[in-house]
Amino acid sequence: EPEVTQTPSHQVTQMGQEVILRCVPISNHLYFYWYRQILGQKVEFLVSFYNNEISEKSEIFDDQFSVERPDGSNFTLKIRSTKLEDSAMYFCASREGTSGANVLTFGAGSRLTVL
Amino acid sequence: LAKTTQPISMDSYEGQEVNITCSHNNIATNDYITWYQQFPSQGPRFIIQGYKTKVTNEVASLFIPADRKSSTLSLPRVSLSDTAVYYCLVGPGNAGNNRKLIWGLGTSLAVNP
């Protein structure tokens, strides 16, 4: 079964440092997403990406966040200057163009710990 | 935006059928109902989606009454490995993005031996 893969599985960083989280979506999928989940809290939408550009972003996705699809296979989330409150699980997801709009395949997540 | 309400937690035993009901009184005409499962420290996993009546796949069944203001996820003969959080989401089926999907806290299902 095709998978969305994410690296690293866990990253510990100091406040103020830049972090890049990487994702390899399923190869024939067209829509890509980043979500985050703070421990014990809800899954929160960050950003959606289609046709090499951001299609929508949430209020959480401020200027310190950026996404990129540099080589047609990887999809990255960059946090320029991490804050303590950025500590969370970050999930990448993708979906086909023709499947239901709400049918996403999620990766296993990257746990970010900001000290 | 449709808001969903589901029980915070449920307990069951191996071999039992589990039904988790979700209320979505403000569901819109073009909204679909989607259920996800999440194990600790893992990403959510799609289970089933429906618009009306009944949908069944190899994992679960989804029952949606005519007024669509609620839905029930039915898990037949649960096992210990079905212990997880189950999310009910409602959102447009033709959306180009998923921002309109609002994730609640879900229902934490504990299956006991």
Image (tube, rainbow, N blue to C red):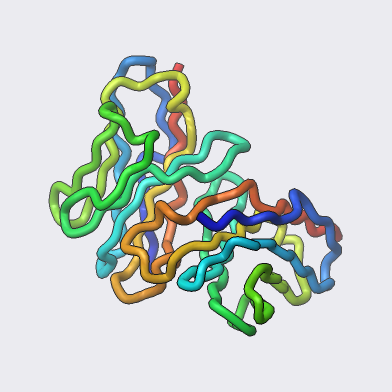
Q: Quarter of the image containing the C terminus of chain A?
A: top left
Farthest residue in the left direction? A71
Q: Residue at the location (30% across, 43% down)?
A: A22
Question: Which image quadrant for residue B63?
Answer: bottom right
Nearer to us in this view, B34 or B91 = B91
Question: Which image quadrant for residue B73?
Answer: bottom right
Q: Residue at the location (55% across, 76% down)?
A: B50
Q: Is residue B76 left or right of residue B91?
A: right
Q: Is residue B35 left or right of residue A51?
A: right
Q: Which x, y percent locates residue B103?
A: 55, 50
Q: Which x, y percent locates residue B44?
A: 52, 55
Nearer to us in this view, B73 or A55 = A55
Nearer to us in this view, A15 or B25 = B25
Q: Which x, y percent locates residue B90?
A: 54, 62
Q: Quarter of the image containing the N terminus of chain A?
A: bottom left
Q: Is residue B93 left or right of residue B39?
A: left
Q: Is residue A83 above or below residue A112?
A: above
Q: Is residue B5 above or below residue A11?
A: below
Q: Residue at the location (68% across, 68% down)?
A: B70
Q: Which x, y percent locates residue A44?
A: 47, 43
Q: Is residue A15 above or below residue A103?
A: above
Q: Residue at the location (53% across, 49% down)?
A: B42
